[in-house]
Image (cartoon, rainbow, N blue to C red):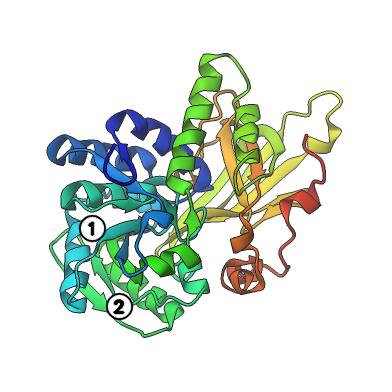
Amino acid sequence: MSERGWTLGTEQLTDLARGAALLGTGGGGDPYIGRLMVEAAIAEYGPITVISPDELADDEFVISTAMMGAPSVMVEKIPKGDEAVRALRALERHLGRSADATIPMECGGINSMIPLVVAAVTGLPVVDADGMGRAFPELQMETFGVYGIPASPMVVAGDHDEWVLIDCGADNSRVEWLARGACIRMGGAALIAEYPMTGADVKRTAIPGTLSLGVELGAAIRQARAGHRDPVAALRERLGGSIYRQLRVLHEGKVTDVERRVVDGFTRGTVRITGFNKPGDAARAGDLVISFQNENVIALREGQLLAVVPDLICVLEADSAEPITSETLRYGQRVRVIGISTPDLMRTPEALAVFGPRCFGLDRDFTPLEQLHPTAD
């Protein structure tokens, strides 16, 4: 145990990678690659200190570090390893101030891992919180920005030692547009340092406890498997005591079609899941179609809305409940699809104006999961 916070070692990384993939709702990048990067960093530099937002002094300086790009590209374009630290150091030089901690921008996939690599290499603590409460595809889609923190100045770093400084003042959407262009020209995936903020800002705007929750969700799946219990029931039990609260099983079936492409720096597409048509479960018969932009955005069964952003739509392997990311969806997979409700901070009018359904081109307003499915299955 460190002076403040708790110590994250390699023994917890497998659970975190699994839990982060779940919270990433199909996106956030490959957690396996991220786990290997953190293991290597811990082996070379030592364990990582994780602190809660409440342990930050109000005047401490925090910078978010992450990977951006299309998850499909990340499968083949593995980071060199030093890009995120170079991005952080370049932003520190520009601002004339050193970071006291780093924080994930999202709690999904590889982006729960990149700040851990930075923390191991630099010795900085990583804050147990994030700016999305899940994964989203665009940089302005963060609770940091929703509640008044500019994304810029920010740095985008590539694997050829190049980096780009972007400063758009308070226009976070323009930051996304410019950074996406730089990322595409760096090969479709890059590392970033963004949203410089104070400890007081973190406490006001971040979704708390998502790193530790990721560890606990991954452990819940692992322990349920070992005890021959239903992993989804274990997830429901753990989430019920968290700020996420609700879990619903939306569909069970086999992947019968996947359409996926890389467009404008995103992995976009749809997956069709044909129901198992279990006796007595006619409500889940038919085909479920999920649309994704890196992350799963909307789930419709025979045209009926089952879940929509910002609530989480997660595709799990049917028996093991191992999360399946958008880039690893394949024909023939037997899956369960679950919905998870988002924290209240992500459901305000200000938040829905930034990452609600209409921000993804959908002609509908947000309907909470628990209104679509009043009772648990």
Residue at the image point whose x is 46% and y is 63% from the top: 203
Q: Mark 2 points at which residue?
A: 153
Crowd band around label 2 with a 10 angstrom C-alpha radius: few (<14), some (14–19), many (20+):
some
Q: How far apart are marks 2 and 1 (CA)?
A: 15 Å
Disc on the earlier residue, 2 or 1: 1
Q: Is residue 366 visible?
A: yes
**Left or right: residue 168 compared with residue 100:** right
Q: Which of the 4 quarters of the picture holds residue 99?
A: bottom left
Percent x, y for residue 150? 40, 77
In the image, 134 versus 99, the foreground residue is 99
Percent x, y for residue 319? 59, 23
Q: Which mark is residue 8?
A: none
Q: Which of the 4 quarters of the picture holds residue 247?
A: top right
Question: Which amino acid type corresponds to the residue marked 2 in the rendered image?
Answer: Pro
Residue at the image point whose x is 46% and y is 68% from the top: 144
Percent x, y for residue 367? 75, 60
Q: Look at the image and tell me in which quarter the N terminus lies.
A: top left
Question: Which amino acid type corresponds to the residue marked 1 in the rendered image?
Answer: Ala
Q: Which of the 4 quarters of the picture holds residue 177?
A: bottom left
Q: Quick one: SS at disc 2?
A: loop
Q: Look at the image and tell me in which quarter the C terminus lies.
A: top right
Q: Quick one: SS at disc 1?
A: helix
Crowd band around label 1 with a 10 angstrom C-alpha radius: few (<14), some (14–19), many (20+):
many
In the image, 68 versus 152, the foreground residue is 152
Residue at the image point whose x is 32% and y is 52% from the top: 126
Residue at the image point whose x is 59% and y is 35% from the top: 238
Q: Mark 1 points at which residue?
A: 84
Percent x, y for residue 244? 62, 48
Q: Can residue 285 be seen in this view?
A: no
